[in-house]
Amino acid sequence: GAVVSQHPSRVICKSGTSVKIECRSLDFQATTMFWYRQFPKQSLMLMATSNEGSKATYEQGVEKDKFLINHASLTLSTLTVTSAHPEDSSFYICMGQDGTGELFFGEGSRLTVL
Amino acid sequence: GENVEQHPSTLSVQEGDSAVIKCTYSDSASNYFPWYKQELGKRPQLIIDIRSNVGEKKDQRIAVTLNKTAKHFSLHITETQPEDSAVYFCAASTPRGYSTLTFGKGTMLLVSP
């Protein structure tokens, strides 16, 4: 069935480095990919929305130059956290939407920046 | 934009009791209201959803009601079990070209045996 595969599930990096998170849609084409961030014991906050082949739309307060989103194909979207700092430590999760509007969450990626 | 308020933030019940979680939304254009269950460190799992043309939907022990006039919707879990313990999120979707989900802040449900 349709799922979104997200990798890595956990990543630890040093402050100042960049980290790339990938989301692949399996058995469906993700026309839209949503990227959420979830801090401990908090809700899911939408960071940005991307449509295949076009630039992502970022929510207010989310730095587009820090959180680079690429959605070059209907089955792959990536989020790159550039120059990561400890305050970027969070649970990042993608959600793909198919052509019918159905939504599929990825497994999530736990980022820890030392 | 859409604003979703969710209450309570924590809910403790005894096994077998019912649990009710309530949400309100601000955007009258919202037309899709899913409920998710999230266990620690895992992705949210869709447990039930309702669209704006329906007032109530039930799936075994889980039911959702929607009052469009008052702009609120509720999750009802009957005969709760310890494995129902998790964080539950409500969400509202507003069509703006594509559907964007806005989540409530979550309710931590603890079911004691």
Image (cartoon, rainbow, N blue to C red):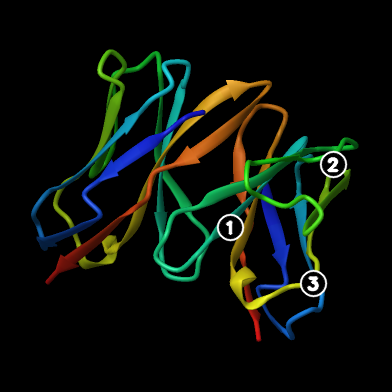
- Is residue B86 placed above or below A14 in the rendered structure? above
What residue is disc 3 on? A83
Q: Which of marks 3 and 2 is in front?
A: 3
Check disc 3: other Cα within 10 Å, few if <14, some if 14-19, many if 20+.
Answer: some
Q: Quadrant of residue A11?
A: bottom right
List x then y, in percent, for residue B103. Answer: 45, 43
- Is residue B69 placed above or below A45 in the rendered structure? above
- Is residue B69 placed above or below A61 in the rendered structure? above
* Discs 3 and 1 share one subunit: yes
Element type where label 2 sits in the image: loop
**Amino acid residing under circle 1:** Arg
Query: Please, which chain is the residue tagged with disc 3 on?
Result: A
Earlier residue among tags 3 and 2: 2
From the viewer's perspective, is B35 left or right of B8? Answer: right
Residue appearing at x 90%, y 37% in the figure: A53
Residue B25: image tag: none
Earlier residue among tags 3 and 1: 1
Residue appearing at x 21%, y 67% in the figure: B82
Query: Please, which chain is the residue tagged with disc 1 on?
Result: A
**Amino acid residing under circle 2:** Leu
What residue is disc 2 on? A74
From the viewer's perspective, is B30 left or right of A101? Answer: left
Nearer to us in this view, B55 or A61: A61
What residue is disc 1 on? A37
